[in-house]
Image (cartoon, grey):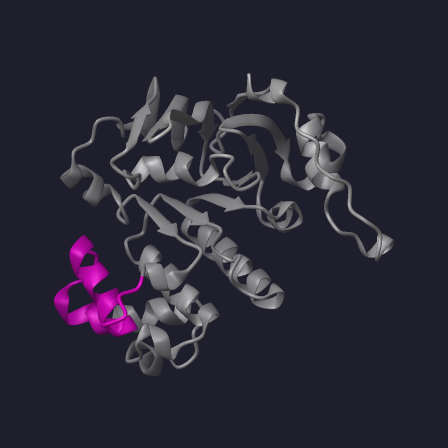
Amino acid sequence: MNTVATHTASQGGAPLLEIDNLRIAFDTPQGRTEAVRGVSLRMGRERLAVVGESGSGKSITFRSLLGLLPASASVSADRMRLEGQDLLGLDARAQRALRGRRIGMVVQDPRQGLDPLMTIGRQLAEMLRLHGKVPRQGVRQRVRDLLAEVHIREPDRVADLYPHQVSGGMAQRAMLAMMLSAEPDLLIADEATSALDAVVRHHMLALIDEQVRLRGMGLILISHDLDLVARYADRVIVMYAGRVMEELPAGGMALAATHPYTRGLMACRPSLDHLGEALPVLERDPAWQN
């Protein structure tokens, strides 16, 4: 079983993100439950996809970088660094400084990250002032530019709208603009397109891909959709039951996959070649958890 994913995009340079032996446990009424068990990875300024079923530990692994886990969670690791900065043991103030400025996160429902009582433009302006990226007199122009960069037409009009006045796709673009406003080193897209229809989903991922490439950022793309991530990632990590099962090149997953869990996930995908046929049931081996 492959539990360590190693790669840097800088051809021998220091990795952007290093995680060694990450473990996350929760205290529950039924006792202590370990949800992430010994995850290790390295990544550079590349596009890394993380796939697996719900409950596999994908989201909480990377939310732990930002201190976004509930109080019932305990996090330990031998190492957790972002371009040399130790992320273990940061206090609340240091974690707030890290969020947005160095690591941005786009979540599944943009309305979870947008204040319903503030216009989109005002929220973007607040992010710019918070991170000190633009002089006060340049904030309005920068808000307009950011909305235009994420392909929002009529950015002046949209800046004056509230989140409930725009579509889900446009709200997600606005959320992306907010995350880009601080110019982070790493962007985490946590199921960022799963609430969108198929066409808008591809447009949104293409936009994220465009901005990541233009800005030289690292991208962690968390998803259930194997086919989707293969188009927008360099590598894929497959997780199950809090562990890394396998690491694959995104462009050749079907040929490179060797772990029975990965091959089972691929076999369960619907296909136009077999319309109307029953899909295989994914079988899970208890040994994969050891």
**Residue in view at x 45 percent, y 48 percent:** 190
**Residue in view at x 55 percent, y 32 percent:** 239
Q: Quadrant of residue 146?
A: bottom left
Above or below — where is 166 with respect to 173?
below
Assign the C terminus to one quadrant of the image.
Answer: top right
Please state the horizontal and vertical placement of residue 62, each as a whole percent of the image: 39, 37
Above or below — where is 52 with respect to 101?
above
Please state the horizontal and vertical placement of residue 80, each as a whole percent of the image: 33, 26
Please state the horizontal and vertical placement of residue 251, each as a whole percent of the image: 68, 41
Would residue 63 be visible to someone looking at this image?
yes
Assign the N terminus to one quadrant of the image.
Answer: top right
Is residue 70 or residue 148 the one in the foreground? Answer: 70
Above or below — where is 35 with respect to 50?
above
Please state the horizontal and vertical placement of residue 55, each as a whole percent of the image: 50, 38
Magenta includes 104? no
Is residue 12 or residue 77 the one in the foreground? Answer: 77
**Residue in view at x 34 percent, y 59 percent:** 112
Residue 91 falls left or right of residue 33: left
Would residue 13 be visible to someone looking at this image?
no
Residue 154 falls left or right of residue 270: left
User: Looking at the magenta stretch, what is its main secondary structure?
Assistant: helix
**Residue in view at x 78 percent, y 46 percent:** 279
Is residue 116 or residue 41 the one in the foreground? Answer: 116
Magenta-highlighted residues: 114-140
Magenta includes 115? yes
